[in-house]
Image (tube, helix red, strand yellow):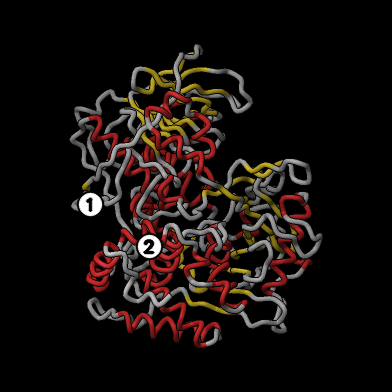
Amino acid sequence: MTESGQIAGGQTADGRTAAAHTAGGQTAGVPTAGVGTAVGRTRRRFLAATGGAVGAAAFATTSRAAATPSAAGRTVAVLGGGVSGLSAAHELAERGYAVTVYEYHDVLGGKARSMDVPGTGSGGRKPLPGEHGFRFFPGFYRNLPDTMRRIPFPGNPGGVRGNLRNATEELFAREAGRPDLHFPLRRLTTPPRLGDLTTTWIRDEVTAALDTATKLPAHEAAYFANRLLVHLTSCDARRESEWEATSWWDFIRAGDFGDEYRILLGIGQTRNLVATRAQEASTRTVGRVIIEALILWGLLGRGLDGDDADIDRVLNAPTSEAWIDPWRAHLTTLGVQFVFSSDVREVLYADGRVTGVRVTDPNGSRPRTVTADHYVQAMPVEHARRTWGAALRVADPQLARCDELRTDWMTGIMFYTRRKVPLVHGHVNCLDSPWSVTAIGQAQFWDGRDFAADYGDGTALDCVSAIVSEWDRPGILYGKPARACTREEIVEECWAQLKDGVNDAGRTLIEDADRVAWFMDPAVTGLGGPDPQNREPLFIHPTGTWHLRPTARTAVPNLFLAGDYVRTDVDLATMEGANESARRAVNALLDRDGSDAPRCRVWELYRPPELEPLKRVDEVRFRLGLPNTFDLG
């Protein structure tokens, strides 16, 4: 892999090839189509600069896949050091490729990284930990935990995965005195045995749960249970055409029922969780991933990442401490090199191949060209598509379709408190919040940390991490949408809406006197001005999105795509999707390179065998133009 100060000529390109990979005895199932100053650090310089020489010894391990003849001397440029880029680098390095990761920031991890709050550490303590937003690892994640197991961590036989902790409940917080809903996040103690899961059992249990927990009118609970049965028994073809084109709002007929139904089952499952509006969100995505994989199969203990996994898991320390820093150290032992402050400006294309990548500092200085045998572009879609020129787009039309993919804002705010805040042992979803605020008390899960002794100036004992998902509705303090507020106004609004949600029913869980400091994601800039910007928005899933998403394999033989926007089985903007896309990109690269190295295993979402016969019946009905058997309209 080389860099030169002279920019090579050429344009950028695009293409799509359908191919399915079989790895580890499991079929991948989804067609795969195929960044300041740039510092070209050697491994030795990198270790010396980061203290990694100690980390390299501590985390030394044996690669599970030996270098193959085809990999010897083969170079790969991974463009982006977020979860997808690091996942791709990990898999490639284990297979003997010489990998260099080019990252825009001066740290790794992308949206998952932790950030120091400037000027807050004293007395030998670390600065207060800040993040883009809280991380959570649903039990149905299987690809990402597999990677985490292969990242050594002192004292953990299971590697970094051993730093995951189960959250035990979620609080659906209501305001104005309405009763809150405490939802347990543990598996059912007596789930149906394999083979005993029936549509009658599902309908009755869902109806009873909604009636008991939410106090929805019986006919509304029954209707939602029926709509869930429709989706559960729909064949893949119906899901990818009919339900992909139908919004979740319309699918559950949210507009025809009461406020509780709309807020809990419509808005609460979309805007608050994935930053997309129920009126726009694809039924295929919401139904399949959030309702089925996350909630229903999670409660039944099916398709989860091991016997110790529950529905929701979080890390036992700030993300970079618990995961990203050990990952970087491990990749360094595998020979991966990192070049920070590298802004990818253009993917250069000529003669049917990528000929290089034009890179500058983030301020546009020091232009140079990076070359390699293969390129894995692991950048968020809003940044990746700016690098594709006309010729590259002609070469692979799926790249041009990425212009239609959409993002929205989902931004984190962290509140540091002078006492431990007893919110709930899990996440808080403020259902009535106009800004769709969600939150979690983090220090309760950091069993290896004494927050006051380890961070800040010793004043803060806890950290409440909140996320603002709705930026276009007026708030309750200033009457302005978040986009029109200053940073300070957003912080005050978020705090007020969080208080409205959790302080009711005669109890006060948080109060103004608790706050010591706050931190807001620095990716959002220009707040309070005419043109606020967010460099790290979230990829969202309006109807029709599935058909616009590219595959990991492109029509250009040495270009591969990875990122949460790439078409994957998990079909949701998640760390799991980012990891899965990287596995698919690596498999496509191995195929193109003629490598005999083992392919990356790809886990797909759980499919209950009891429902497969009903899906086959629905496939026949779909081809005949008939509705699903359970679809009563």
Which three-letter amino acid code belongs to the residue tagged 2? Phe
In the image, what residue occupies the spot 70% across and 82% down? 177
For mark 1, what is the residue?
27
Q: Callout 1 environment at 10 Å: few (<14), some (14 to 19), or many (20+)?
A: some
Going by the image, does 510 lie left or right of 605? right
Counting from the top left corner in percent of width and height, residue 89 is at 37, 37
In the image, what residue occupies the spot 39% across and 68% down? 292
Q: Nearer the viewer, residue 93 or 304?
A: 304
Please, what secondary structure does the residue beneath circle 2 have?
Answer: loop
Q: CA distance from mark 2 to mark 1?
A: 18 Å
Q: Nearer the viewer, mark 2 or mark 1?
A: 1
Q: Nearer the viewer, residue 525 or 86?
A: 525
Q: Nearer the viewer, residue 42 or 488?
A: 488
Quadrant, the C terminus: bottom left
| Vertical relation: 355 (above or below) 552 | above
Please, what secondary structure does the residue beneath circle 1 have?
Answer: strand
Q: Earlier in the sequence, mark 2 or mark 1?
A: 1
Counting from the top left corner in percent of width and height, residue 67 is at 23, 32
Going by the image, does 65 lie left or right of 457? left
Counting from the top left corner in percent of width and height, residue 322 is at 48, 52
| Vertical relation: 152 (above or below) 400 | below
For mark 2, what is the residue?
140
Going by the image, does 248 lie left or right of 500? left
Q: Callout 2 environment at 10 Å: few (<14), some (14 to 19), or many (20+)?
A: many
In the image, what residue occupies the spot 45% across and 20% down? 11
